[in-house]
């Protein structure tokens, strides 16, 4: 089994890449620990018209479908306890 991955969606333009990466990792059966910065939530709203609550995260606000193969674990952006990949960087 491959190790968990932390994905951070930040305030850089290109939030479509972060959401597509998340969908791809989940479809591949990975466990993804997701964090979204406040600026990342603003960019998601602006570029993809997706309103994501950082305090009461609901995967349905970000993804078109519920993750079926993988597991999604949300972490508040103030939690810096895991290694991560940042997309886009």
Image (cartoon, rainbow, N blue to C red):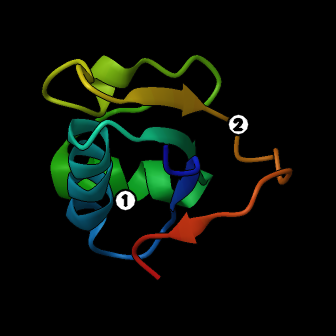
Residue that extends furthest to the right in the rendered view of this protein: 81
Q: Which of 51 and 9 is in front in this view?
A: 9
Left or right, residue 27 beside residue 13: left
Q: Which residue is drawn at 24% across and 43% down?
A: 28
- Which numbered tag is attached to residue 43? 1
Q: In this view, does 16 lie above or below 28?
A: below
**Percent position (x, y) of residue 12?**
43, 76
Residue that extends furthest to the left in the rendered view of this protein: 64
Q: Nearer the viewer, residue 65 or 46?
A: 65
Badge 1 crowding class, 10 Å Cα cut-off, few under 14, some 14 to 19, many 20 or more, is: many
Q: In this view, does 81 lie above or below 72?
A: below
Q: Residue at x 59, y 51 (%)?
A: 38
Instruction: Please report contact status of discs 1 and 2: CB closer than 8 Å, yes or no.
Output: no
**Percent position (x, y) of residue 86?**
53, 71
Q: Residue at x 71, y 46 (%)?
A: 77
Badge 2 crowding class, 10 Å Cα cut-off, few under 14, some 14 to 19, many 20 or more, is: some
Looking at marks 1 and 2 on the same chain, the residue that comes earlier in the sequence is marked by 1
Mark 1 and mark 2: Cα distance apart in space: 17 Å
Label 2 sits on residue: 76
Q: Quadrant of residue 84?
A: bottom right
Left or right, residue 28 beside residue 10: left
Q: Would residue 53 be seen by someone viewing this image from the given angle?
A: no
**Percent position (x, y) of residue 66?**
23, 18
**Percent position (x, y) of residue 72?**
46, 29
- Which numbered tag is attached to residue 68? none
């Amino acid at each position: 089994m491959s190790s968990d991955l932390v994905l951070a969606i930040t305030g850089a333009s290109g939030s479509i890449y972060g959401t597509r990466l998340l969908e791809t990792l989940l479809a591949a059966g990975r466990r993804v620990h997701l964090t979204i910065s406040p600026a990342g939530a603003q960019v998601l709203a602006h570029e993809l018209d997706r309103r994501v609550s950082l305090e009461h995260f609901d995967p349905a606000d970000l993804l078109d479908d519920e993750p079926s193969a993988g597991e999604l674990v949300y972490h508040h952006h103030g939690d810096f306890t895991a290694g991560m990949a940042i997309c886009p960087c």
